[in-house]
Amino acid sequence: MSGIEEKDGGGISAMPSRRTVLALGAAAASTVVTIRPALAQTAGSVLNCEIPVPGPHAGGQYISAEGSLVSPGTPGAAPPLSRPLTGEEVKALLNSGATPPGVSPQSAQAYANYIRRLQAGMSGFTCYASLQMPR
Amino acid sequence: MKHQLSLRIGTVAFRIGSAWSAPIEALRQLYRDYPEPEDGLCDFTVRLEPENFLRRWIRPSVAIQGDYILPDAAPLSLAHGLLAAEMGMNLQMALGQKRFLLLHASTVEKDGRALIMTGESGAGKSTLAALLGERGWRLMGDEFALLDLDSGRLWPFPRAISLKNGAIRVMEEEVERDRFGPRLTGTPKGEIRHMRPNRRAVEAMDKSAVPALILFPRFGEAQGLRAVGQAEVFMRLTQASTNYVSLGRPAFDALTKLVGDHPAIAVDYPDTEGALAQVETLWGELAA
Amino acid sequence: MSQPRYVADPDGEVRTVQLDGLALLFHRPSGMTHIVAPPAPQILEALRLGPADIGELLGRLRAWYDFEVDEDMEALEARVAELEAAGLVARL
């Protein structure tokens, strides 16, 4: 019943009969998928999380429309949020553009872009990664 | 810490400490009849701590601490302290378990063979497992399946089942009142109620089983069945595992063997009773 | 300017399991697992014979296989680039 053909250290388990057709695929195709560490599926059971917008490193800076940190009072920039967004609020914001209470659509867009640009090591990144949002 | 409880669940022993007594008392009730850790030795520690000094007393706010923690975790209110303890235990397993390959799945056993159900949260695997556990199957766990890297057997981890929203009502109709924890409303995931596994599950917490069938149930879809290709099963199981990558070669061998030796079916279902019947049929055809 | 030459790890460094038409590879040096579709396993097999540039690699594959269409180097380069990004192939 086993579907496995195994060969330690080998590539294909048996040389195919001569003159098998091999397709090299289109230049843009993908034939290699690497398994990455995953917390996302378990996240609901282990993480009740929130994302501060911006993180504590920002030191009072505002958030530009593209989601980067800029000095306060820069035209068009959104002010720091007074409380972190919950995982649910972030999901709604990124999925359907649902703005958190008291936030203008323009600011919401800036916050969404800030979150999308979070990198590992930044406050809120684990939360963002656990939401399984495509970048 | 001021208040403490030590608990053994299958092969894993926890010590849970808390600044407040209420969560510990709720745990003690929920896990009544569970064994003590052997020799008092615990594998993991969970601590429920005040978010800051004032929050110990004023609008008490529970931060989940322990051997393993996650950054960005939001604190919970004291009313949800039991939930915090359960999440804390999940977290220790998810980040710290090294002896077994951990799969985010529910498992039930019949005649020494195990059914593994895995999928996204809300797909229904916990409810199905809880119901099967009351209908002739032995519940091994609803959250984590523990795959032994050497033997390929599955080991039980019969934690209290975390029921959400509609599933609470379903189980309240099946199961006696004293197996339930408090009803927790307004949690980040809606309404939650914990349910202790039945006596059969608790008494068999040291009995492993051979895997026999893998299902990917999905609730809320029109009825459908599909055999899932092995490479896809492998991929999805790695996504359902928190420690696959860190365990290296033994995990690769154990998981390829699991996937290669056993069939996997995706089951879409619009109603729970129909799903249960479907599970029994598939088991009869493929695993019994 | 000469073409880059590529190498793959020797036999003993990669454990391969076939599952329904795809190959699962455990790469010992990195501890990483990859799921690969043809022609990736065939390219790795060909590179295990010894270092090769894209042209030489194409020649080795032509010796074993027919190609459906006149395969150009661009497609093979793309496949090798994927394997390089995954750490299964390295440039000399």
Image: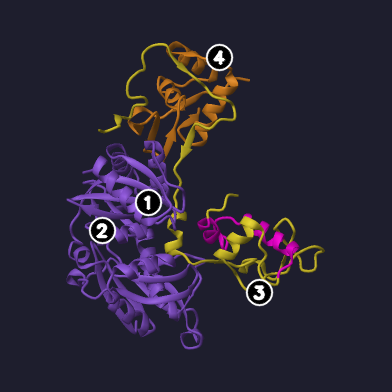
Chain colours: A yellow, B purple, C orange
Q: Residues within 10 Å of mark 4 (few under 14, many from 20)?
A: few
**Quadrant position of residue C48:** top left
To which chain does the residue with label 4 belong? C
Q: Residues within 10 Å of mark 2 (few under 14, many from 20)?
A: many
- Amino acid carrying label 3: it is Ser
Task: For mark 1, name the chain.
Answer: B
Q: Decide: is B252 above or below C50.
A: below
Drawn side of residue A39 relative to residue A56, left or right:
left
Q: Nearer the viewer, residue B122 or B63?
A: B122
Q: CA distance from mark 1 to mark 2?
A: 14 Å
Q: Residue at x 60, y 62 (%)?
A: A90
Query: Are the numbered discs 3 and 2 placed on the same chain, yes or no?
Result: no
Q: Are marks 1 and 4 on the same chain?
A: no
Q: Is residue B225 visible?
A: yes
The residue to which callout 4 is attached is C69
Q: Residues within 10 Å of mark 1 (few under 14, many from 20)?
A: many
* Foreground tag (3 vs 2): 2
Q: Amino acid at mark 2?
A: Met
Judge whether residue A130 is colored magenta: yes
